[in-house]
Image (tube, rainbow, N blue to C red):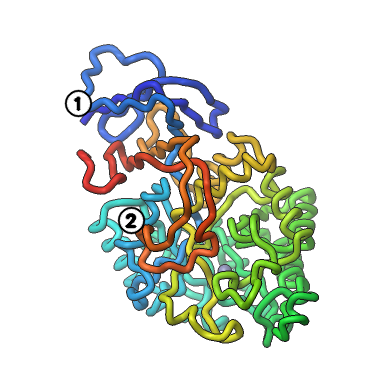
């Protein structure tokens, strides 16, 4: 299968490329950029005039809910949502049921992802058995089964001693630990950001310190262990500053921001809107500005959705009781481009944070457009405006906090290994 994509604006942040160029694919890989290779006979041509052609997006923080909670999402529906959002590679978190804390679960996820055959799905293994925070998993075994990183995400790892041993284990093998930072002693009883809004609404607050203390602890331990740690969904100015200064000291620490923390604040909880409830919570405007600046300067080198689908019933409860989390796969590109429109990032940097940035963190052969690379591509119309309508999305759940937002930039085609996987029912 030989494919020529002609006339698109090719943007590859990893290579500093941005310009109109043709792209040629053979046997699932990029064969040439620019000049038609000699004796190249395309089986198919795509006219990409007026479109941006960039690496397929990489989302390093996704909850696919399979196995165990398929009424919220499964690997098939999550994969459809991903490729509809231009995402060609994603990492799925271990808080499934059963937890991905053993080889058989990892293998089940990988087999199912292969059957679905849309996005490339990379499981994240649990750090502790059953996310129980006590007994370390056989990370080595999980890595050999295909886990690309380790995380108890969804549950903070409260015990400093267990965290130290987890870091030592991970450091021995060079594994990446992805950390959900929340000191339970400080977040207990809280359901939103601690501050005047929580007080006015009579809701228990979660102070920034709940995040900052855990980040500080784990950075101190990383200094001791030499582990590579990655802080998930950084939401506080203090957390940003801790990571930035640790990086300046040479520590192997990285971080990511979630779109909801880049656009929303605790005032968006409004009248107890359950779609504004997540962990960590939406913070203040000053925190949001700090997280934006950190994505711009690279302190946080990835934007990751923390896609956390929930059925309506899980959200239709009192704010204090309802489930944490929001969907994100299908709004990632539009919101990332909105950061460009709002002057937070230039286009190349913005696309880097959703392509090569996360791919590098996970050690994936993805997120760039060099000759020989897998032809995982996102083609989008940078001018197309659309309104976020959860009912029209491919995710099984509707819990987007961005419903009704108008976004600019819409995915028109997604290719994985040179095959068109979106729009659905295409010519392949
Ligand atoms: Zn988390």
Report whether residue 139 is seen: no
Residue occupying image coordinates x 52% and y 63%:
306
Which quadrant would residue 166 be assigned to in this image? bottom right
Residue 211 point in image, percent of width and height: 71, 70
Q: Where ligand 1 lies, by image quadrant?
A: bottom right
Residue 357 point in image, percent of width and height: 56, 45
Q: Against 56, is 106 above or below?
A: below
Task: State how many labels appear.
Answer: 2
Q: Is mark 2 within 8 Å of ligand 1?
A: no
Gap in Å between the C-alphas at discs 2 and 1?
26 Å
**Of residues 160 and 302, which is closer to you in this image?**
302
Tell me if 52 is positioned left or right of 343 in this view. Answer: left
Name the mark nearer the viewer: 2 or 1: 2
Residue occupying image coordinates x 39% and y 21%:
7
Q: Which residue is mark 1?
A: 43
Q: Which mark is residue 350?
A: none
Q: Which residue is mark 2?
A: 80
- How crowded pointer 1 is (Cα within 10 Å; few <14, some 14-19, many 20+) is rated as few
Tell me if 180 is positioned left or right of 111 in this view. Answer: right
Residue occupying image coordinates x 26% and y 57%:
116
Tell me if 215 is positioned left or right of 395 in this view. Answer: right
Residue 381 point in image, percent of width and height: 44, 35
Residue 139 point in image, percent of width and height: 47, 68
Q: Against 26, is 189 above or below?
A: below
Dot 1: element: loop
Which quadrant would residue 8 be assigned to in this image? top left
Residue occupying image coordinates x 19% and y 26%:
43
């Amino acid at each position: 299968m030989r494919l020529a994509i002609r006339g698109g604006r090719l943007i590859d942040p990893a290579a500093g490329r941005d310009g109109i160029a043709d792209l040629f694919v053979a046997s699932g890989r990029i064969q040439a950029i620019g000049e038609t290779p000699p004796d190249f006979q395309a089986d198919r041509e795509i006219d990409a005039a007026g479109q941006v052609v960039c690496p397929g997006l990489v989302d390093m923080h996704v909850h696919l809910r399979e196995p165990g909670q398929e009424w919220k999402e499964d690997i098939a529906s999550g994969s459809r949502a991903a490729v509809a959002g231009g995402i060609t590679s994603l990492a799925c978190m271990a808080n499934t049921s059963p937890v991905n804390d053993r080889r058989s679960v990892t293998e089940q996820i990988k087999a199912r992802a292969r059957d679905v055959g849309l996005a490339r799905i990379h499981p994240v293994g649990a750090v502790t058995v059953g996310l129980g925070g006590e007994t370390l998993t056989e990370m080595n075994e999980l890595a050999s089964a295909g886990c690309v990183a380790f995380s108890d995400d969804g549950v903070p790892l409260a015990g400093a001693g267990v965290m130290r041993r987890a870091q030592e284990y991970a450091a021995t093998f060079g594994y990446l630990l992805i950390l959900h930072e929340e000191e339970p002693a400080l977040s207990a009883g809280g359901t939103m950001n601690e501050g005047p809004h929580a007080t006015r609404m009579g809701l228990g607050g979660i102070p920034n310190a709940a995040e900052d203390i855990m980040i500080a602890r784990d950075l101190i331990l990383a200094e001791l262990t030499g582990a590579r740690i990655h802080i998930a969904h950084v939401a506080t100015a203090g957390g940003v500053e801790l990571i930035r200064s640790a990086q300046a000291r040479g520590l192997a620490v990285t971080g990511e921001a979630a779109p909801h923390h880049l656009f929303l604040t605790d005032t968006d909880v409004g009248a107890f809107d359950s779609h504004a409830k997540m962990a960590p919570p939406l913070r203040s405007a000053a925190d949001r500005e700090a997280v934006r600046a950190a994505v711009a300067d690279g302190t946080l080198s990835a934007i990751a959705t923390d896609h956390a689908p929930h059925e309506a019933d899980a959200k239709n409860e009192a704010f204090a009781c309802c489930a944490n989390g929001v969907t994100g796969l299908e709004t990632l590109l539009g919101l990332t481009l909105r950061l460009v429109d709002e002057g937070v990032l230039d286009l190349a940097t913005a696309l880097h944070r959703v392509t090569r940035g996360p791919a590098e963190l996970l050690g994936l052969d993805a997120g760039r457009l060099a000759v020989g690379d897998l032809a995982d591509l996102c083609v989008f119309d940078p001018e197309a405006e659309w309104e976020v309508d959860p009912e029209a999305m491919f995710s099984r759940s509707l819990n987007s906090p961005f419903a009704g937002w108008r976004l600019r930039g819409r995915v028109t085609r997604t290719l994985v290994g040179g095959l068109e996987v979106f729009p659905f029912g295409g010519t392949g």
